Image: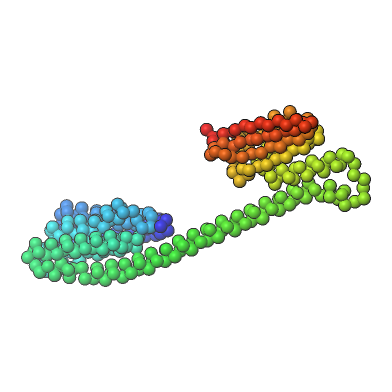
Amino acid sequence: MPALLKLPSIGSSVLFVAYSATVLALAYTAGGDPMRTWQGLLALVLALASAVLVLAAGTYPLARGRSALIAAAPAVVAYLITLNLRPDGLPGWTAWYVLSGTLVLLALAVRGRIAMAWVGFAAVTAVNILWAVRAGRNPLDGLIMMQAAVAILVFGSLFAVGLRTLMGRLHAYSETEHKRAASSAAEIATAEERRDRVVELDALVREPLTILASDLFLSADFRSRLRALEGELRDRVSGANFLVEPATVAIRAARARGVDVLFFDDVGLVQLHLDIKTRLAATMATILDAVDRGSATLRLSSEAPGTIRLSAVTEVDGDLHRSTQVIHTRMG
């Protein structure tokens, strides 16, 4: 799933300040003997660093490598503190690492790594049990130290599951809305293109149709214009790849000379690069410029990938001339 859950910088800063203030207050007011050693100071630095790592912006869920480091940090902190933890009595807030680690693992679960959060919690529990055994105490004492933390992580995990479901639904909704917006944009673009085509067609045929509908005498010049117009309209349907200069100039000139020009574009659905169209147009212009009367029929076809075949048949005074040229369409 994409990065749907990025904590804003202000929000992450507020959380980090609140977490740091709580941990520092507990460590220095109730930390006891462990905080008078280098192991305690290192544990405090690791606890703060893991908070930075889990609160920094990232994908949802967090990357596996980053999540593994975050999940392992509370257990390392717990081990460093228990090295100097007094074996007698109840540790109380001297074991501040239980709260700090649980909060970091809670944040990890909310960031989409619920299983890793519980693995990290199990590791902290194992460190506590190891401390109890090493201190000659009942192993259950290590479990009792985690009883409040279990409730925190359980409810946090339930919240994380609900959040994951919500994010999945929001992502699906977002995808649907994006597709709907794209479809709507395509429909609008299609409608606009139709309107443009109608305006263009109206500009071409309005005047000739008005004259045809009147009782005016149709001169030879006007009839010639109608033939040229009919050919141009036909080209727009069957010869889209031909409508590039210099072919368009050669087409008008040939029809003005009385040449009957026909096109058949069998590759009209293939999107040709403008450079390829220009090369085709230049070749067709050369063929048409050589015909001063009669007819010229040109056909585009694609018989092999990356090639376009241009076939031409010209007829002058009953004499037929056929030619074929192959143009490569791969660029570079």
Looking at this view, name the residue that lies furthest to the front.
Answer: 318
Q: Is residue 252 left or right of residue 28?
A: right
Image location (x, y in percent) of residue 151: 26, 71
Image: 95 above or below 295: below
Instruction: Kindly indicate the quadrant of the structure image that contains residue 165.
Output: bottom left
Q: Which residue is at the front of the view, 292 or 247?
A: 292
Instruction: Kindly indicate the quadrant of the structure image that contains residue 131.
Output: bottom left
Residue drawn 16% across the image and 52% down it: 38
Q: Which residue is at the front of the view, 320 or 94?
A: 320
Residue drawn 28% across the image and 69% down it: 154
Q: Which residue is at the front of the view, 149 or 163?
A: 163
Residue drawn 59% across the image and 43% down it: 271
Q: Is residue 302 left or right of residue 216?
A: left
Question: How many marks overall?
Answer: 0
Q: How is the image coloured?
A: rainbow
Residue 298 in sight in this render: yes
Q: Quadrant of the N terminus?
A: bottom left
Looking at this view, name the residue that lies furthest to the left.
Answer: 136
Residue drawn 74% across the image and 38% down it: 261
Instruction: Kindly indicate the quadrant of the structure image that contains residue 118.
Output: bottom left
Residue 33 in sight in this render: no
Image location (x, y in percent) of residue 172: 46, 62
Image location (x, y in percent) of residue 292: 78, 30
Q: Is residue 305 left or right of residue 251?
A: left
